[in-house]
Image (tube, rainbow, N blue to C red):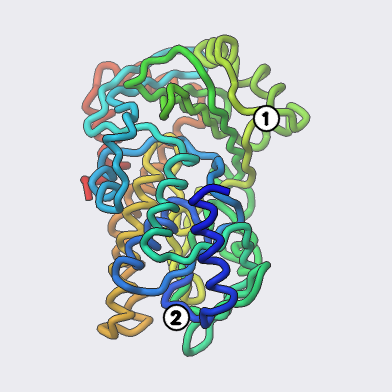
Amino acid sequence: MNDHTLVKTDIIADTIFTKKELYDVAIVGGGLAGLALAIQLARLNYTVILFEKEQYPFHKVCGEYISMESWPFLHSLGLNLKSMQLPMIKKLIVSSNQGKLLKHDLPLGGFGISRYLLDYELEKIALSDGVTIRENTKVNDVVFNETGFAINTSQQNFHAKIVCGSFGKRSNLDIKWKRDFISTSKNSLNNFVGVKYHIKTNFPADTIALHNFKNGYCGIVKIEDDKYNLCYLTNAVNLKKNDGQVNKMEENILSKNPHLEKIFRESEVLFASPLTISQISFDKKKQVEDHVLMIGDAAGMITPLCGNGMSMALLGSKLAAEQIHEFLKGNIERNVMEERYTEKWQKQFATRLKMGRTIQRMFNQSWLTNFLITSSKSFPGFIDYLVRQTHGKPF
């Protein structure tokens, strides 16, 4: 048993036997937004408990590219990014499903890092800052009353003054609470499947590529340890047409793009099997559900081809932390906290999400993708405009 495991075991034992189960803040979901929020609040001397259904470290379906706008914030959380020798991404390549290429310099740029490493490092920081983390714990329900929340989990029950939902793209709570996007009929924005591998391949370390194929697109970017992340999003129809077999879909559909065919043929896959997630939705979501503040993908998802979901999750956690702090200090009422958080979230991200949905619709049409790639070569300022509309400033 290593030191990290010992620390977690001691915290869990203390929680079970000696702590009153009332926290200032409970966070459901230990991804990027949840961990970042937990660290911020713990440093403000609030008691924080975070529930994660998996056990760290673990892989997630994610593009694993972060815009440089998040670098200062991650550094402030205690993450020494410079020491990790991460690949710095400065260039973008986009291909049509026929193989036509667009090459462009990224105005701000970014860096590649796996969620396996990033979340694990943030978890260690959260533990050192006093956050109580309950791994392998599924939250079954969260119920609000006038004084706070009752939280029912697979392990035991807890209580908190505030609850934040950071449970990703789709969860059992989304279904239980009958959130609006769950009941929306299938359309071009809510019926997607995500697939991810880590691979060894020959590809420029300073470049992120987005390769289009029929009803989907695939991203490739270098991460730590000379590995690359290959992650793609496709309409569920593609998988259904190939008998639900990922390898068959890659051969029959993705490999029609010559750039993807070359990647699949020449790369070494490092996963025993692909990591997948289904029923991904980019429909609009509410930022507050029955007094639970939503952060990260639970609050709203930008389409992956915009390459900025991780930065949005981090900035969203900062916005939530500011309003939670004001409420717990007694400066504002709960309804004001919720209204301000929603307003600030919308101000930061509504335009990005709208642009992301527009771009997604455009790239769903092969002829339009070819036209955009061909015409954009003559109008590089148009690409800069699209990038600016889906990214923010350093925070």
Query: Looking at the picture, how far across and down is residue 32, in whole percent?
Result: 43, 51
Depicted 46 relative to depicted 233: above or below: below
Depicted 297 relative to depicted 245: above or below: below
Query: Looking at the picture, how far across and down is residue 157, in whole percent?
Result: 62, 77
Residue 181: tell me if it is visible. no
- The residue at the point 36 percent across, 59 percent down is 317
In the rendered image, which quarter is residue 39 located in?
Answer: bottom left
Query: Looking at the picture, how far across and down is residue 127, in whole percent?
Result: 43, 59
* Horizontal side, residue 117 vs residue 276: left or right: left
- The residue at the point 41 percent across, 29 percent down is 224
* Horizontal side, residue 52 vs residue 122: left or right: right
* Horizontal side, residue 12 vs residue 121: left or right: right
In the rendered image, which quarter is residue 107 located in?
Answer: top left
**Depth check: 113 or 243 in front?**
113
Query: Looking at the picture, how far across and down is residue 384, in whole percent?
Result: 24, 31
- Which residue is the site of mark 1? 273
Q: Tag 2's secondary structure?
A: strand
Residue 161 is labelled as: 2
Which comes before the other along the chain, label 1 or label 2? Answer: 2
Depicted 377 relative to depicted 349: above or below: above
